Image (cartoon, rainbow, N blue to C red):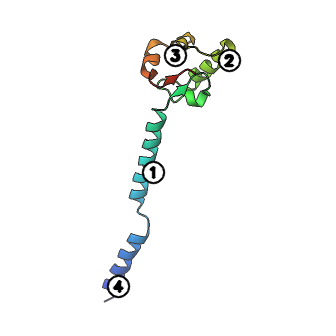
Amino acid sequence: MFHVTALAALLVLSIIVENPIVATTTASAETARAATTASTDKVNINTADAKALMSLSGVNRGLAEKIVKYRDEHGAFKKPEDLRRVEGVGNGLLEKNRERISVK
């Protein structure tokens, strides 16, 4: 009789206590969803800070800071292609991100 009661108690506890596997899966799904959202949002290269610029594919902190510095020194970009004037930005980077870059 003790074994049946103990098993029943364990069953109830397993239902009540959050399953760490489910929690990990949920957190991973939320992280993936956030990454997908971040990688599809438009980035206005005339107003974005370094962190926002880093969401573009191939843009690390150093390049993001160069973009901000260039913009501060030379004024707003008139078209996405103007980004190539920044040292370190090539055709490949521009083409990979063309759909996400906006100039307003």
Q: Earlier in the sequence, mark 1 or mark 2?
A: 1
Q: CA distance from mark 2 to mark 4?
A: 72 Å
1 vs 4, front mark: 1
Amino acid type at circle 4 is Thr
Name the mark nearer the viewer: 1 or 2: 2
Expressed as whole percent of the image width and height from the top left, the position of residue 55 reads 51, 30
Q: Position of residue 20 (x, y in %)?
A: 42, 59
The residue where tag 2 is placed is 72
Q: Residues within 10 Å of mark 1 (few under 14, many from 20)?
A: few
Which label belongs to residue 5?
4
Q: Are marks 2 and 4 in contact (CB under 8 Å)?
A: no
Q: Residue furthest top?
A: 85
Residue nearest the observer in this picture, 63 or 70 = 70
Q: CA distance from mark 1 to mark 3?
A: 35 Å
In the figure, is residue 17 to the left or right of 72? left
Q: Tell me whether circle 1 and circle 3 mark residues in contact (CB < 8 Å).
A: no
Helix, strand or loop status at disc 2: helix
Which badge, 3 or 4, is on the more N-terminal residue?
4
**Marks 1/2: CA–CA distance:** 38 Å
- Describe residue 99's horizontal placement relative to residue 60 as left or right: left
* Local SS, label 4: helix
- Of label 3 and label 2, which has the lower sequence position? 2
